[in-house]
Image (cartoon, rainbow, N blue to C red):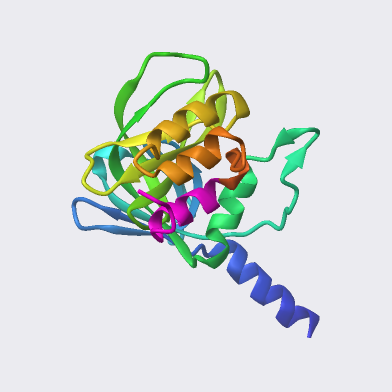
Amino acid sequence: MRLLIFCIFFTFSIFGQDKLYLKDGNTIKGSIVYILEDFVKMRNDSSGKVKKFDKKNIDRLVEKAEYFDNDDDYINGVFNIFNIYEKAILNLDSLEYKIRKISWRKQRSPVVIKDEWLVAKLISGKVSLYVGHKKIDGFRVTQYFLHRDGEEEMKNIILNEAMFKKRIAKYFSDCKKLSGKIENKQYKYNDIFKIIESYNTNTCEL
């Protein structure tokens, strides 16, 4: 019995459930090692080797959603940004990354950067929530983006108290009741799901 359990665990450890679809028609099955905005590193199931794939060669990437139970909204007084990701994928079997046009800015920087990133959709609707990852100052930073139907580019949202109120209230300014709740702090940055849901379900007064 122990041997059987070990074999099952070993099999799932060795063979991944992620799939990388390339523009040349090839499909790579394996385990994702690393995802950034412009490349993916993946361990091939067949060869066991890790290979880097540039975004220009990627059509889409399907990653098995893994949920790590962490209900703490705050860690040492700081909002747990990773909890947004974990809550979002709770009802998802997989995440599909594609190249999308984005506009983003570093924290405390007024400069808007336009680029194309590998991003995955977490919430769908009139306004959708996406996630992507970028290496900034040597660290892998998770970025979140909002995309409104009909717009070409997605815009990043910085989830801290100083930036959130002004930027998100402005983003949802076509919904007066919702933007008002953001401005008077009824909705804060850890309520991003509620904000998007309210907007998408037409429960706001336009």
Identify the image quadrant of the N terminus: bottom right
Compared to 147, does 68 lie above or below?
below
Compared to 185, does 98 lie above or below?
below
Instruction: Tally the marks.
Output: 0
Q: Please name the residue shown 30% across and 39% down the image.
A: 55
* Residue 100 x, y percent position in the rendering: 28, 41
Prevailing secondary structure class for the magenta stretch in the rendered image: helix
Q: Please name the residue shown 45% across and 48% down the image.
A: 42
Compared to 145, does 67 lie above or below?
below
Q: Which residues are magenta?
A: 192-206
| Residue 175 left/right relative to 11 | left
Q: Please name the residue shown 44% across and 58% down the image.
A: 203
* Residue 141 x, y percent position in the rendering: 54, 31
Residue 204 located within the stretch drawn in magenta: yes
| Residue 171 left/right relative to 108 | left
Residue 162 quadrant: top right
Front position in the image: 127 or 65 = 127
* Residue 64 x, y percent position in the rendering: 49, 61
Q: Is residue 41 visible?
A: no
Residue 20 located within the stretch drawn in magenta: no
